[in-house]
C-alpha cells in the first residue's frame, strides 16, 4: 500500500483518467472488475491467486489479466517473482476515473462507459444486499456501517464540486498511514452517487 501514498491526490499517477474505449470495455466485465478490486485490497498478485480469490479458472484469470494489461490498467511486477515462470501483476494506478462528457464524439467509448457504469452499479448494489442479508451476525461492524442519503438543490457546477470534495475525502482515507496497533481492520466498500432525480 505504500506505493499508493507516494502520490498526491491530484497526481495523475494516483488518480488515472481513462480516455479511451479500450480501457472502458476492459472494465465492463465482472471478473475483470473483481480482479481490479482484489489488486486494490490485497496488492500485487499472481494469476493463480487472483483466480482463487475471484472464483474462476487460472486460464480465465490469465486471459482477463492480458485484457487489463493491453488496456493499460495493470502491469507486471517482475521484482516480486521468485523465478522466471512466476508472473506478478499490480494496478497501474490506485484510482480510476472517467466522464462520459469527455467521449461525446466517440460513440463506442460512450457506450462502453455506460456498460461499465451500469455493471459497477449492479456490483455495488449486490454488495450492499449481501451485507444487509448478513449484517446481524457482524457484531461491531453492524453498528459501524452507514448509509447516507439527502436531497440537495444544486447546479451542475455545484454537484461537480460536491463530487470532487467527496472523492478527495475518500482519497485521504485511502492514502492514510494505517496504524500498526493490532486493531481489526477489514476491507470496506464505500460508494456514493449524486444525480438529478425526482421523488
Image (cartoon, helix red, strand yellow):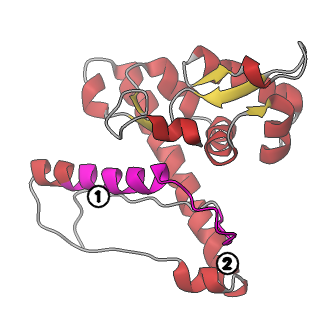
Q: CA distance from mark 1 to mark 2?
A: 25 Å
Q: Which residues are magenta?
A: 162-186
Numbered label attached to residue 11: none
Secondary structure of the residue carrying tag 2 is helix
What is the number of callouts on the image? 2
Residue identifier under label 1: 194
Counting from the top left corner in percent of width and height, residue 183 is at 66, 72
Q: Nearer the viewer, residue 68 or 77?
A: 77
Q: Is residue 67 above or below residue 160?
A: above
Residue 63 in percent (x, y) is at 76, 22
Horizontal and vertical percent position of residue 13: 43, 27
Horizontal side, residue 5 vs residue 75: left or right: left
Task: Please name the residue shown 34% across and 21% down the image.
Answer: 107
Which residue, given by chain and number where applicable, does mark 2 sit on?
133
**Crowd rating for badge 1 (residues with CA inside 10 Å; few <14, some 14–19, many 20+):** few
Q: In this picture, is 160 found above or below 13?
A: below
Amino acid at each position: 500500500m505504500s506505493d499508493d501514498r507516494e502520490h498526491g491526490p491530484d497526481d495523475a499517477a494516483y488518480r488515472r483518467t481513462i480516455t479511451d474505449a479500450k480501457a472502458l470495455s476492459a472494465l465492463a466485465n465482472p471478473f475483470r472488475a473483481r480482479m481490479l478490486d482484489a489488486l486494490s485490497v490485497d496488492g500485487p498478485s499472481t494469476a493463480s491467486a487472483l483466480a482463487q480469490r475471484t472464483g474462476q479458472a487460472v486460464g480465465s484469470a490469465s486471459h482477463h489479466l492480458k485484457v487489463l494489461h493491453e488496456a493499460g490498467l495493470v502491469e507486471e511486477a517482475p521484482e516480486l517473482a521468485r523465478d522466471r515462470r512466476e508472473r506478478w501483476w499490480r494496478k497501474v494506478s490506485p484510482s480510476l476515473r472517467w466522464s462520459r462528457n469527455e467521449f461525446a464524439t466517440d460513440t463506442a467509448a460512450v457506450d462502453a462507459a455506460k456498460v461499465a457504469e451500469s455493471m459497477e452499479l449492479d456490483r455495488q448494489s449486490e454488495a450492499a444486499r449481501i451485507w444487509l442479508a448478513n449484517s446481524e451476525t457482524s457484531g461491531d461492524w453492524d453498528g459501524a456501517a452507514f448509509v447516507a442519503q439527502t436531497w440537495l438543490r444544486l447546479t451542475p457546477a455545484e454537484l461537480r464540486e460536491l463530487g470532487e470534495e467527496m472523492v478527495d475525502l475518500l482519497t485521504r482515507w485511502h492514502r492514510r498511514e494505517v496504524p500498526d496497533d493490532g486493531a481489526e481492520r477489514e476491507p470496506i466498500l464505500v460508494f456514493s452517487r449524486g444525480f438529478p432525480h425526482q421523488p
